[in-house]
Amino acid sequence: MTLRGKSFLKLLDFSSDEIMELILLAEDFKRRKKTGIPHRLCEGKNIALIFEKTSTRTRCAFEVAAADLGMKTVYLDPAGSQIGKKESIPDTARVLGRMFDGIEYRGYGQEIVEELAAYSKIPVWNGLTNECHPTQVLADLMTAHEHFGSLKGKKLVFFGDTRYNMCNSLMVGCAKLGINFTACAPEKYFPYPGLVDKCEKIAKETGSVISLETDPLKAAANADMIYTDVWVSMGEPDEVWSERINDLTPYRVTDGIMRSAGCNCLFMHCLPSFHDLGTSVGKEIFRKFGIDCMEVTDEVFESKQSVVFDQAENRMHTIKAVMAATLADL
Ligand code: CP
Ligand code: NVA
């Protein structure tokens, strides 16, 4: 694999083989970690972690993976830097590019992370933008690969807001690896047609099918993976909650949907998830709308078919693979 010096901004930039090799590298790192074999392949390097939105998994995954690879991290929180407020992205990128070996960026528009990469001249890794969440999808595909042993010909169905980062990146990842992909939502929540076209072209080459469906039970039939995400993403205004709850409640992942898929189907979620009243937002929604879960029922979330914590763990192994592949000679 020759990804040294390359940024990881979106899955469209990578070939099917490169994506699969990153997954296999992550599986190898997981074995090394579990058996205590050191893998300090980036000893002495320094990376910056920029978070303009909050995070638990992505930040921890970058921090732990960097430490395992022998690197030091500097964390820049949403309020603690000049980025975008007193200093432009090109200027920030050129400053950080002089000090660091790599930059992780989580924030808003995809154009910001693309600009950071263009100006910093060092590898930049996308830790989530409004449009893409590529490191999450690597972890999801790794989880499915561990579970099924192979990915080609499987079927993944995404329920919910199919216009946002998670569905976009899953659709690309599935197309690249020959996984049949269905986006299931009301029509007005369907993904951007330009991206669907691109994915259909890729899917044709890899032998899979991309489809859009409004009927949840029809979409779920014979699925190998059912995936959902929060109905309101970070950075969206509170005012959209009411409309989303109204429009997307029929697309909640329930026992009925899982039964339509069959008992071997995995339930997947990038997390965090509103599946109970264990969060302040969940409680507030219950008070206002009288519902005790949103995109998935607690029953499905806690079921044997749920692999959500495997996905969360695999964030660390896949992010490690991305950093090692782009910073070290493997
Ligand atoms: N899935 C994910 O990106 O989680 P965090 O927001 O906690 O990083
Ligand atoms: N769509 C979600 C994903 C969180 C990992 C968001 O952007 O908030």
Image: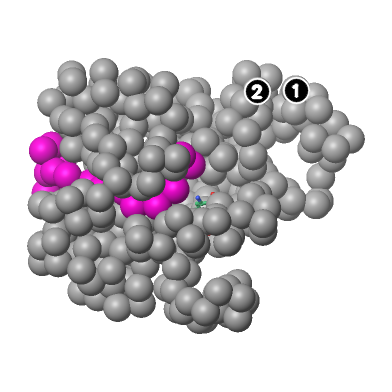
324 with respect to 37 (left or right): right
Q: Earlier in the sequence, mark 2 or mark 1?
A: 1
Q: Is residue 271 above or below residue 96?
A: below
Mark seen at residue 231: none
Element class at badge 2: helix
Residue 6 among those drawn in magenta: no
209 with respect to 57 (left or right): left
On the image, numbered disc 2 is attached to which residue? Answer: 115
For the point 81% across and 28% down, which residue is it?
88
Q: As drawn, which residue projects farthest toward the right?
A: 86
Type of the residue with mark 2 = Glu
On the image, numbered disc 1 is attached to which residue? Answer: 90
- The percent position of residue 42, horizontal first and vertical second, equals 49, 40
Q: CA distance from mark 2 to mark 1?
A: 7 Å
Is residue 58 in view from this perspective? Answer: yes
Q: Where are the magenta residues, as a range? A: 149-164
- The percent position of residue 231, horizontal first and vertical second, equals 49, 56
17 with respect to 99 (left or right): left
Is residue 21 in view from this perspective? Answer: no
For the point 28% across and 37% down, which residue is it?
212
